[in-house]
Amino acid sequence: MEVKYISLFDYLGRPAGKDVGARVNERAREFGVLTKDREVECESYKGKVNLYPEAFLEYYFDNLNNMDAVYEKALV
């Protein structure tokens, strides 16, 4: 089965912003999710963007509140 990697922009349909991108990237690293990157160039941004497995992004955004609560409990 081939894993489909997409950017946060591709998934959300709009720019995610640095804060959301940082939180998603942090969770991906914590869960050992393999990421990729690609170069993009458009009017508002030029540089690398992270790509995540589409299934991870679906899980992350579907369970955002639950994941944050679990993460905060683990830090205590």
Image (cartoon, rainbow, N blue to C red):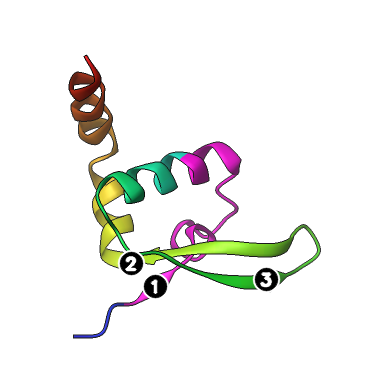
Say if mark 1 contacts mark 3, CB within 8 Å.
no
Q: Secondary structure at mark 2?
A: strand
Measure the C-alpha gap from mark 1 to mark 3: 15 Å
Q: As drawn, is 21 to the left or to the right of 5?
A: right
Q: Is residue 69 above or below residue 33?
A: above
Measure the C-alpha gap from mark 3 to mark 2: 18 Å
Q: Amino acid at mark 3?
A: Val
Q: Amino acid at mark 2?
A: Pro
Query: Pointer 1: what residue?
Result: 5
Q: As drawn, is 21 to the left or to the right of 42?
A: left
Reading the chain from its start, which is encountered first: label 2 or label 1? Answer: 1
Q: As drawn, is 28 to the left or to the right of 8?
A: left
Q: Position of residue 75 (x, y in %)?
A: 24, 20
Numbered tag placed on residue 53 in the rendering: 2
Q: Secondary structure at mark 1?
A: strand
* Residue found farthest to the bottom: 1
Identify the residue at horizontal 43%, vertical 39% (top origin).
23
Query: Image quarter for residue 56?
Result: bottom left
Q: Position of residue 28 (x, y in %)?
A: 34, 51
Query: Image quarter for residue 32?
Result: bottom left
Identify the residue at horizontal 51%, vertical 46% (top origin).
21
- Is residue 14 on the magenta stretch? yes
Query: Pointer 3: what residue?
Result: 40
Q: Position of residue 33 (x, y in %)?
A: 29, 58
Reading the chain from its start, which is encountered first: label 1 or label 3? Answer: 1
Q: Which residues are magenta?
A: 4-22
- Is residue 23 on the magenta stretch? no
Pick the front one: 1 or 62: 1
Q: Secondary structure at mark 3?
A: strand
Q: Position of residue 73 (x, y in %)?
A: 19, 20
Q: Residues within 10 Å of mark 1 (few under 14, many from 20)?
A: many
Query: Image quarter for residue 71?
Result: top left
